Image: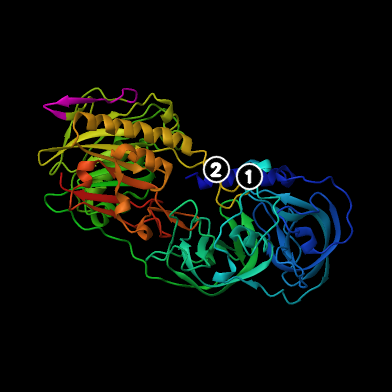
Amino acid sequence: MPSRSSARLAALTVAAVCTAASVVVVASPAHADTVRIHDIQGTTRLSPFNGKAVTDVAGIVTGVRGYGSSKGFWMQDPNSDADPATSEGVFVFTSSAPKVAVGDAVTVSGTVSEYVPGGTTSGNQTITEIVKPTVTVVSGGNAVPAPTVVRAWSVPAAYAPAGDPAAGNSINGLKLRPNRYALDYWESLEGQNIEVANTRVVGATDPYTELWVTVKPQENDNRSGGTVYGSYTAQNGGRLQIQSLGPAAEFPEANVGDVLRGATTGPLDYNQFGGYTLVAQRLGTLKSGGLEKETTRKQKKGQLAVATYNVENLDPSDATFDAHAAAIVRNLQSPDIVSLEEIQDNNGATNDGTVAADQTVRKLIDAIVAAGGPAYDWRSIDPANNTDGGEPGGNIRQVFLFNPDRVSFTDRAGGDATTAAGVTKVRGKAALTVSPGRIDPANAAWNASRKPLAGEFVFRGKTVIVIANHFNSKGGDQGLTGQYQPVARSSEVQRHQQATLVNGFVKDVLKVQRNADVIALGDINDFEFSGTAELLEDGGALWSAVKSLPKSERYSYVYQGNSQVLDQILVSPSIRRDGDLAFDSVHINAEFHDQISDHDPQVLRFEP
């Protein structure tokens, strides 16, 4: 997924430079007579008054935001029209801390603008605003218009209309149908005071004091209380981001499955990092759902346990080594082989040419021993500097940990950042030409992305070839709440190329030895139902073991309130046929506010 902190910095920069830089102009500026808020909002996503001056627009202040780059206030007309497509609320952008209070009756003169959070290239929808305002307070202490209460049946099951092909599939110009589409429903309330009650948390509190709830508690729900993203046509329109107008210190620390009891009320905003967002004047009371971190079962003596775990940019300066060690020893039950993703070099994001990661790995191994785990050995290949993506200078890579008391590693010299591993035959069995080695590292499919790490292991006399992966991220894809529907997933192009190469390598192994035990695992950065997974599985060479779980339990990551699969363990046919095969997605991070990584690890147990 794209970096949240870097994207936020860019957004603040864009907003701070000039609001007009993100204005969508659909009409030439011209004077307009006094209008009502619902006239300004109109029946599409773009105001019919966009770019025009308006005078003496009346409303009651429902929320004041005096911080950040988007200072201003929301106001609402207490006398609504009869059209469900037109919102009665609007945001007034003041640029400096506004001099109004909730309950003030005001009139506003200014220019109507369509602001795009994140800039026009972000693909986000617009927020209808009044900018460069002259604000007159008519009276204070007025009753705030009663919030529109959002209930489960309020939000349609269908997610979004198909966009206009003549406008690049944008939905901006389409007439809103709030009774038919979820995104149209939320848009019809933009800027308006709304209320949700007794809502279940589906995305844990993040470092930016945000969380996600669902107003449709039975929409693709799972036993943890989350909302599962199980197909491209089930986007879960009941999800809603919650922020607060109150102090950050008072924001609840919520996990998935917790409930905000009572009413949460405030204006409905549109946020760059999640779309429609209730900015709460009043937050419900947090009621714990009792979610606990999972522990998988220990492998049997004759079973090989193989795990994948994205440790999120781990470098020696981090404070999470002990926590990661405890997770590997206790929650994962000390797997025999652990594929680690996002191991950074010895000085992390310091961009000085360092590529070795031995200090990072050694610090983790020592912490595992201190936590009561095995003294793992390890193998990896240092990347060429700044060629594998991730934080500049961090040089993330995959690393194999293995327990030498149960597993041996077959070393074949010659593997480095640029040498391609091949497949040969040794004593009638498939073998790697270099071990550890990288799969086709010079191929353009791996540009600015991690190259797969292949290694040959032996367990109880049986050879197992393991391929550790970290595919291209989803950065650059259009957002689910964006103006383009259906969304374009441009990042798939590179992942599809990567999946084809890994699938081809596995097929090369199986050509040499039909019953070879091969595992391809890691942060695939794509769903089990995706085209990427289909290409990895092509021809039956591999099968994603997460499909052995019920659909409601298939997830390793939570993004914008959607529980989804990004991490996978795929196995060759000989492993899949093991009658005692067991796969477990061990939920210890993604659903918790105190996560040490944004990914959950997975474990596979089988008998080679």
In percent of width and height, residue 378 lies at 23, 37
Q: Is residue 425 visible?
A: yes
Marker disc for residue 158: none
What range is drawn magenta here? 417-429
Residue at left 33%, top 40%? 537
Specify whether 69 is left or right of 39: left
Residue at left 43%, top 60%? 593
Number of residues whose C-alpha sits closer than 10 Å to that of mark 2, classed few (under 14), some (14–19) or many (20 or more)? some
Q: Distance between the residues labelled 2 and 1?
A: 10 Å
Element assignment for label 2: loop
Q: Height in image: 323 above or below 359? A: below
In percent of width and height, residue 292 lies at 34, 65
Residue at left 38%, top 29%? 354
Question: Which of the 4 image quadrants contains residue 97?
Answer: bottom right
Specify whether 477 is left or right of 88: left
Q: Height in image: 262 above or below 438? A: below
- Was residue 428 drawn as part of the magenta stretch in this picture? yes
Element assignment for label 1: loop
In percent of width and height, residue 563 lies at 43, 56
Q: Earlier in the sequence, mark 2 or mark 1?
A: 1
Secondary structure mostly taken by the magenta-highlighted segment of the chain = loop
Q: In this view of the protein, which residue sits in the foreground, 220 or 326?
A: 220
Task: Name the residue carrying label 1.
Answer: 169
In percent of width and height, residue 470 lies at 37, 39
Q: In this view of the protein, which residue sits in the foreground, 513 or 195?
A: 513
- What type is the residue that disc 1 sits on? Asn
Q: Can residue 387 be seen in this view?
A: no
Task: Name the residue carrying label 2.
Answer: 488
